[in-house]
Amino acid sequence: MVQAASATPNSFRTGPDEHGHFGIHGGRFVAETLMPLILDLEKAYETARKDPAFRAELTYFLTHYVGRPSPLYFAERLTDHFGGAKIYLKREELNHTGAHKINNCIGQILLAKRMGKKRIIAETGAGQHGVATATVAARFGLPCTIYMGETDIERQSPNVFRMKLLGAEVKSVTSGSRTLKDAMNEALRDWVTTVEDTFYIIGTVAGPHPYPAMVRDFQAVIGHEAKAQMMKAEGRLPDTLVACVGGGSNALGLFHPFLDEPDVRMDAVEAAGLGLETGKHAASLAKGRPGVLHGNRTYLLQDDDGQIIEAHSISAGLDYPGIGPEHSWLHDIGRVNFVSATDQEALDAFQLCARLEGIIPALESSHALAHVARIAGDLPKDHVILVNLSGRGDKDIFTVAKALGAEL
Amino acid sequence: MTVARIEARFAALKEEGRPGLVVFVTAGDPDLETSLEVIKGLPAAGADLIELGMPFTDPMADGPAIQAAGLRALNGGQTLRKTLDLVRRFREDDATAPIILMGYFNPIYSYGVAAFLTDAKMAGIDGLIVVDLPTEEDPELCLPAMAEDLAFIRLATPTTDEARLPTVLRNTSGFVYYVSINGITGSAAPDTAAVSAAVTRLKGHTDLPVAVGFGIRTPEQAAAIGATADAAVVGSAVVSMIGTAAAEGLSGPDLAARVNAFVATLAEGVRGARRSAA
């Protein structure tokens, strides 16, 4: 039976197709030099994910090295403060290295070992993915180079030092806007030169197929755990899921296992920077249009000529002019609601969470909390919100101090 | 003319029994009018084909020289529309030199594929090289371009093995561009013996001419590559010279004269690699 392209699918969880497409998004837009390796990677991943030995190894490291499962925590004081919906936090910031990023890094480095790769590269924005990659590279004894924009190196200096302590080489990227997108360009340039022996651990649900699906699968442990934990805590599924979205790996990791639950609403929060109307933001769904960058088609911030526009966010991890292709598709079909929060709203939520819950959230995750701050009060007390607290905010104290005018 | 103009040029080169020189410059670098002067001078300086770079903010396969050239052009306000217009103006005086646009897909996708192909053909463009469109993405641009008789020139690389080569060579026309090294433009010089073996391997799979590029900077290297390949591509060395000249304050005919004097030495190198007509 022929269905209209806009028809609601039977399941939201079957993508991508064999070409790596989620609707019109995704694909494999890479240089020919990388294509044979991308195809190898796809095969290796398909074999590994069905291999019980690989799954057992992954589970072992997630349990004993990362510290999973991460707790589901009822944020009583935030709940009381807003006076509406019950707020639960999925505590990904308690993982080893302090964010959800390590879930994916463990998966990819085990795959790199299986493929016999000798060297690891990665890009990083906030430094969380860089730290997680440097960590697994140290644990598995592989040399590691992390590309990081010069601007991000300045605003995330604690993470830079952590990566160096872990034995990684941190290369400062001075091209373009000197942030995440340029770090990704530079990592791709390294990869095209060292393709024979190097594995590129991409940190988010973007890039050429199979990366968006593979990273999502490795991060879906967040949603699978949360589902079971919520059943135990509340005896039912949550009403609303909330997560911040830059590339979108923590959001998709939480959302994906819930996509076919029709009663679960999902809100993903883009970084509105100084405000959507100012042009200084990172809201590629709110203000972008489909284009091709970094191996996939997706919504991008771009000008009339198809040139990429630099993003802005106080949070280095959200400071990217694109978004993972599966999010773009979920936006097109309306399954996930994409909203945004400004730098200021994130800063307010950052401080509120610290003072009321004794948890210093990452500035990235603070965008999710900022959205919760907007909606929770108006929702009934039996409405359950589950927020992905994707990372801890220790790395952000210098940025926050500067924004608040405090001297450190 | 389209793909036929490229075929005619390679047929003429074969007749002359020599390899060709392909020169890459970025459209609008360092400014639109100077860029037109440079391009106008290229055929007389000995460039047999012209590769015109379409500037893009995120040139993932390019090294520092071509990144900088793209940035100079973009800072000067270059757009894809202006690049097409540049070619149209070049064509007012030159109906024979093949022009191939090279770059990344997003500006074309943003322009709209159908509109772009119509306008590119009208401007006098003969072929396209789009770095981030491997054969897996042929429906995006390759197939529509070939339906319009524009050459879609494929990149083959050292990682393209025997099993994949037939896939890469399907849906291609004009010539095959062999990327001599795993890496970005302007990298270390390729190993001539390895390139020679690769060209021979490619020729076992296709009747199309084979041009070799990436890392060729001097007349001597161009000559060595030209000993086996049907053409040598020089890019970064030329755009570096444009960058240096622009930084010294040169523009217009002065800058074009300096750049084309260098192109002439490359052409001399390539012509020195004369082979007996096959």
Image: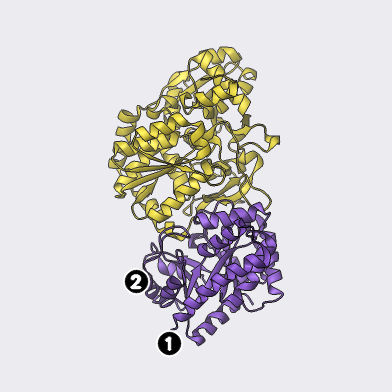
Name above or below for residue B274 compared with residue A181. Answer: below
Residue A177 in view here: yes
Q: Position of residue A138 (x, y in %)?
A: 31, 37
Task: Please tell me which residue lies in front, B257 or A394.
Answer: B257
Real-space Cα separation, disc 2 to disc 1, in angstroms: 20 Å
Name above or below for residue A266 compared with residue B224. Answer: above
Task: Please tell me which residue lies in front, A96 or A263.
Answer: A96
Residue B3 in view here: no
Residue A145 as seen in the image, left or right of residue A350: left
Closer to the N terminus: mark 2 or mark 1? Answer: 2
Task: Please tell me which residue lies in front, A104 or B232.
Answer: B232
Task: Please tell me which residue lies in front, B224 or B107.
Answer: B224
Label 1 is found on which chain of the structure?
B
Residue picked out by circle 1: B276
Tell if the residue under mark 2 belongs to the same chain as the one under mark 1: yes
Name above or below for residue A153 compared with residue A86. Answer: below
Residue in view at x 29 percent, y 33 percent: A60
Label 2 is found on which chain of the structure?
B
Q: Secondary structure at mark 1?
A: loop
Palette colour of chain B: purple
Q: Position of residue B125 (x, y in %)?
A: 64, 70
Residue A209 as seen in the image, left or right of residue A372: left
Residue in view at x 59 percent, y 20 percent: A405
Q: Position of residue A159 (x, y in %)?
A: 43, 31
Q: Position of residue A230 (x, y in %)?
A: 46, 23
Total labels: the figure holds 2
Task: Identify the coloring.
Answer: by chain
Give the class, few, some or many, for how many residues have Cα within 10 Å of label 1's Cα (few <14, many ≥20): few
Q: Secondary structure at mark 2?
A: helix
Q: Amino acid at mark 1?
A: Ser
Residue picked out by circle 2: B193
